Amino acid sequence: MKKFNLIACFFSLLLITDLNVLASDPTEQRKLKNKIHNFSSKNIDTNMSTKWSLTGLYLEKYDDNYTFIKNPKLKMFNSNLITNISSDTAIDPNGEMSEIYLKSNVSVNRNNSSNGNIIKLYTSYAIFYLSRDLIETDRDVTIITSDSTTTGNGLSANLDLGLITILSNAERTIKEGNQLQTIKGNQMIYNTKTDEWIVKNKPASDLKKSIGNKVTTTFNLN
């Protein structure tokens, strides 16, 4: 019995050690190549127009091009639309700015200068695919427009198409004069170009699960 207890304790220690390694900072397993404080960068197209600009408190690039950014502020320009994205930290896995992983106090602020419409989006974790102008998360989200506040769980927002989909447990509160109206649905789709909302009874479970797997794996969430 004592021998069995010793073996059990040994494997328990191994399990705890493995969990600690998985939960550790991924930068600890890499070799730092360079660190830039108060950095800024721009992406300019063939017409010499700025597509996006990125600034941050500091940037750390590692030997495999894994990039860590503290207090990133990304500004995107598309016709009359200006989108500001910020978070406490960000990870660019391959250093190519094709997709970035945003963690803690994620904020997306989109301003349409042609009509003055502003959309604000808040969540805790998100993945932003720059090449597709797509933001995804399986976390709780809040979306604020000029006349409404909408909450839900899970999000897929195609900024280029102007389609914002809340994947489940959606609830929208609309202000009309002094009256408040609440609309609930298992899924809601907002078209920012037409300012129209569509309510669906069925949640986008498969998409939410797919996003959730990537978010959980990336940020070592339980």
Image (cartoon, rainbow, N blue to C red):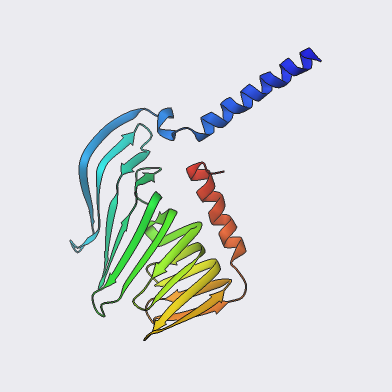
x and y percentages locating residue 181 in the rendered image: 47, 82
Task: Give the quadrant of the N terminus.
Answer: top right
Q: Which of 130 and 71 is in front in this view?
A: 71
In the rendered view, does 41 fall on the left or right side of 200? left
In the rendered view, does 198 fall on the left or right side of 112? right
x and y percentages locating residue 53 in the rendered image: 24, 55
- Residue at the image point whose x is 60% and y is 27% from the top: 16
Residue 99 seen in the current view: no
Task: Give the quadrant of the C terminus.
Answer: top right
Residue 175 lies in quadrant: bottom left
Q: Residue furthest top?
A: 3
- Residue at the image point whose x is 63% and y is 27% from the top: 15
- Residue at the image point whose x is 22% and y is 49% from the top: 41
x and y percentages locating residue 182 in the rendered image: 50, 78
12 shown above or below 119? above
In the rendered view, does 3 fall on the left or right side of 62? right
Q: Which residue lies furthest to the front in this view?
A: 178
x and y percentages locating residue 102 in the rendered image: 39, 50
Residue 27 seen in the current view: yes
In the rendered view, does 185 fall on the left or right side of 105? right
Q: Nearer the viewer, residue 177 or 83?
A: 177
Q: Residue furthest left?
A: 48
Q: Please tell me how many numbered marks the rendered image carries.
A: 0
Residue 131 lies in quadrant: bottom left
Q: Which residue lies furthest to the right in this view?
A: 1
45 shown above or below 148? above
Q: Which of 11 and 94 is in front in this view?
A: 11
182 shown above or below 206? below
